Every structure is written in structure tokens, then in C-alpha cells.
Amino acid sequence: MRLLILGGTWFLGRALGELALSAGWSVTTFNRGVSAADLPGVQVVHGDRERPEDLKRLAEHGPWEAVIDTIGYVPSQVLTAATALAPVVGRYVYVSSVNVYTGWPDEPLDDESPLFDCPPDADATFGADLGYAGQYGALKAGCENAVVQAVGQERAVVLRPGVILGPNEYVGRLTWWLTRAARGGQLLAPGPAERPIQPVDVRDVAAFALACVEDGKVHGSFNVTAPIGHATFAELVDTCVAVTGADTVPVWADPDWLVGRGVQQWTELPLWRTHRGVWTVDSSRAAAAGLACRPLRDTVSQTWAWMNGGGSPITGEGEAGRAADHGISAAQERELLRTWLQES
């Protein structure tokens, strides 16, 4: 099996390459060669997807049974790349996001929920009036349309992950909780402890993507999350404490109280969000097609092992710098804990 990965150096792209290589596949990666090291064992083609001449040169390395696009964000760029690669790839797998749904994160979602409307040739300015999250979702929806226009519905596979966690994470969500748990002491945790969550392991996303490629007949769109109710926030926090071995005691604060104190959801306390739809994404279609999700405790423990083995969130420009945006300061956490314990 010959596979092309657009990206292939960070997180999901790296997991895809590692898993495909372990299965004996021939893997080519295409990226600019400036963000992270290329994966040993792959055929590397460096170039910029914004340059038609680079895409033409890439296509000359084909054909491939499939391409997996892990980095496409601007519809017009995805359309150009997919059009250039259409003659030399069998299937086109595009990694999208649950943000494409107009109802996320406020409403429960399934695979048929309404999507943002964005043309396949839109540029990066489309949807600027929607705010950051809305624009991101609209642009990803446009990218989905671009892939379908370029290769047709029967050759297009669209994956819509929610939150992806696991080794090599650079966003800074799980890695922040692990680092904080390892510091010990009283840990501010967002109640209720039993709040269901459904993050998916990066290796499970990779395995499902490769299964779709190998099947050769799978097409359409799939929500890619762990099942609803897969785990709880308490399981996340307690496992972080357990695997670090620290003398850490979670203190569960009322979510309305935290909101009232100005604590930023999703960033200052990563993965915490009070919106009712954020952790109610139905992924039963993907499960029926072969998505299997490991227990959250395995994701947490193996991420901690990676961090202790020399791994750390990638830092740098763009997406790789997002780890700095996550986590509450120690001083703010201490003050919030002091006030909560006095008032509760």
C-alpha cells in the first residue's frame, strides 16, 4: 500500500506515518520541512501547498492508493492540492473537525447535523465576521467541499475529530494537566467531577484513517470521537494524579462559580467547557465502520511515559505554539482555591 500524507511531522500526521510504516506500507510525506523533523523511514518531498509548481513536482512521485490531508485549512488551497493530486491518488482522506457543525459546542451533534456553508474556493478571509471558532469551522467545511469537488464523493473520506489527545501532543491540553498534577498540592478542578467527556486517542484516529484507506470502499463523513460517556473529568484528573505519583489533591469547584470568577473555559482549565454539546458528539457511524477507542487511562499514562522519555509539546510558530495558550497560572490558581475553600 502506497500512502501520501500531507503534513506527517506533527501529532496526527506523525502517528499516521508511524502506524503505516509498521504495517509495511510505503509512505511519502509532503511538508515545508520547517516545523519539525521528518519521520525516519518515509520518502520526504519538501514543498509548499500554496505553490502550484511544488504540487506538480509532488504529483510526479505518485501514484498512491490514498492521500491523507492532515493540515488543510484554507478551502482554495485544499482545492488546488486535491485537484493536482486527483489523477495520482485513489482515495482522498481529509481531516476536518467537529467545528464544521453550526451547533458545536452548544448542541448535541450527529453526522447529519447542519454544517457551515462555505464555498470550495474560499480564501482565508471567509467567515471573518463569525469570530475565531466560527471562521475556523466555516473554513474547514469549505475544505470538505473542496475535496469532494476535486475527487468526487465516492473517493472522498472526511474525518471530523473532536478533541485528540495522546503522545506527541503539541496543543498543551493533556500535557498541561499532567504537568500540573506532577507539581503536587491542591489542584483546582472544574466540577462536576462526573461530567462525561469523550476525547479520542491520536493513535485510534490514525488507525481508523488507515482502515478507511485499506478498505477501499469507505467514503463519506465520520465524526471521530470516543463514545458519548466514554470517560469523566474525574477519570482524567485522577489518572493524571495517579500516573505522576504526586501528592496531589483535586479540589472540585462549582462551574458557575469558576465562570463568575472569569476563568477561561477550554484554555485556562484545558478541556473544561460548560456548553452542553461539547462532549455529546455521536460517533456511532465511525464505530460501525471500525473506529475503536482505547480507555482514557491508557492515553494519559502513555502520554506521561512519552513526556518522561524526552517528549514535550512542540513549541514554535503557528499551531506548534498553542501549548503556551493553555493553563492557569500558579498564582491565580492559589487565589481561586483560597477563595473557593473560604466560600464553600
Image (spheres, grey):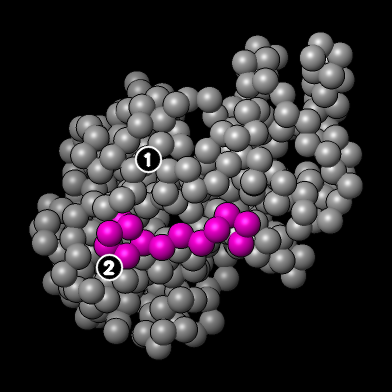
Contact, mark 2 vs mark 1 (Cβ under 8 Å): no
Q: Give the residue type at disc 2.
A: Cys
Is residue 302 on the magenta stretch? Answer: no
Query: Going from the N terminus, do you reach mark 2 or mark 1 first?
Result: 2
Position in image of residue 313 (x %, y %):
66, 55
SS under mark 2: helix
Q: Is residue 104 above or below residue 238?
A: above
The residue at 65%/12% (across/down) is 260
The residue at 67%/15% (across/down) is 257
Position in image of residue 60 (x %, y %):
24, 79
The picture quadrant where one finds residue 207 is bottom left
The residue at 12%/56% (across/down) is 153
Q: Which mark is residue 212?
A: 2
The residue at 49%/48% (across/down) is 230
Q: Is residue 190 left or right of residue 143?
A: right
SS under mark 1: loop
Q: Give the residue type at disc 1.
A: Val
Q: Which mark is residue 133?
A: none
Q: Is residue 247 above or below residue 31?
A: above
Closer to viewer: mark 2 or mark 1? 1
Position in image of residue 192 (x %, y %):
63, 28
Q: Mark 2 packing: few (<14 Cα in 10 Å), some, or many (20+)?
A: many
Q: Is residue 112 left or right of residue 49?
A: left
Whether residue 317 appears in this view of the structure is no
Position in image of residue 34 (x %, y %):
54, 63
Is residue 293 on the magenta stretch? Answer: yes
Q: Which residues are magenta?
A: 286-298
Whether residue 239 appears in this view of the structure is yes
* Position of the C terminus by quadrant: top right
Q: Which mark is residue 281?
A: 1
| Front residue (pair 299, 93) | 299
